[in-house]
Image (spheres, helix red, strand yellow):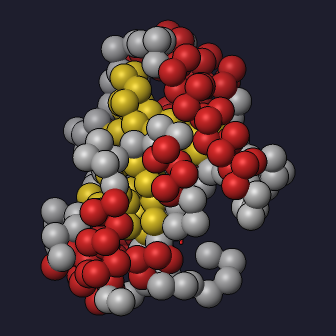
Amino acid sequence: MSIRENINQIKATLPDHVSLVAVSKTKPLDDIMEAYTAGHRDFGENKIQEMVEKQEQLPRDIRWHMIGHVQRNKVKYMAPFVHLIHGVDNMKLLREIDKQAKKHDRIIQCLLQIKIAAEESKFGMSAEQAALILRSDETAQLDHIAIVGLMGMATFTENMEQVKQEFTKLKTIFDELKALQTPNCNLQTISMGMSGDYQLAVACGSTMVRVGSSIFGERNKNN
Ligand SMILES: *Cc1c(COP(=O)(O)O)cnc(C)c1O
């Protein structure tokens, strides 16, 4: 099936309250344009450099999602345009995003990444660390960021029961943290679910799925 058909088929299965980020990492501009022409506007990349290069060459109304691990010293490159940063996992990074957003007179939307997977390699913070950030006076004073939700990645496993438990855990944490509101924190979004597990994620409460290979085809390994 074509990219257009894949994207339309996935969208048709998603409830109205769930949005789709088409993960275009490693894929060429033509592939993104095919999805764009089909009406899609939200694209996700996991490397800042690659996202910047694509952004420069593609239509301005694309909403770019940074879904990968963010190095603080690279925030400045995406600050002029990034729509949503999914992987915020520490206060220092939040401070830097605020600082760079201010230079461009923007408010950058962020998700706090929560570690739900059993694997050591996955980034993210605990529910307690997220609560500290949401409660802190310093966060309340960062007026160029808006914390709009949480993001999580399940363990890479065939065991769907385990994945379900991890997604459910994120939904529970979300419901708890939603109560902690500061002026610039208003949790609305739960970003969870990828090609292999997005339907399960939606059933567990996801409001934003990040789908790559089911739209654009397989990537080379390690991406
Ligand atoms: C690559 C990636 C995805 C998409 O993965 P697929 O299995 O190709 O759908 C989703 N989220 C993150 C954080 C990724 O790095």
Left or right relative to 70: residue 105: left
Is residue 85 something that shows in the picture? no
* Foreground pick, 96 / 121: 121
For image coordinates 51% across by 21% down, the residue present is 175
* Foreground pick, 132 / 102: 132
Total tally of numbered discs in the picture: 0
Image quarter for residue 157?
bottom right
* Foreground pick, 192 / 102: 192
Q: Position of residue 110 (x, y in %)?
A: 42, 39
Ligand 1 quadrant in view? bottom right
Is residue 181 something that shows in the picture? yes
The C terminus - image quarter: bottom right
For image coordinates 41% across by 13% down, the residue present is 181
Q: Position of residue 70 (x, y in %)?
A: 56, 53
Q: Position of residue 25 (x, y in %)?
A: 47, 74
* Foreground pick, 205 / 148: 205
For image coordinates 61% across by 35% down, the residue present is 168
Examine the rendered structure and indicate whether residue 105 appears above or below residue 216: above
Examine the rendered structure and indicate whether residue 74 appears above or below residue 54: above
Image quarter for residue 36?
bottom left
Examine the rendered structure and indicate whether residue 130 appears above or below residue 214: above
For image coordinates 62% across by 51% down, the residue present is 153
Image quarter for residue 88?
top right
Left or right relative to 26: residue 208: left
Examine the rendered structure and indicate whether residue 115 appears above or below residue 21: above
The N terminus - image quarter: bottom left
Q: Position of residue 7 (x, y in %)?
A: 31, 73
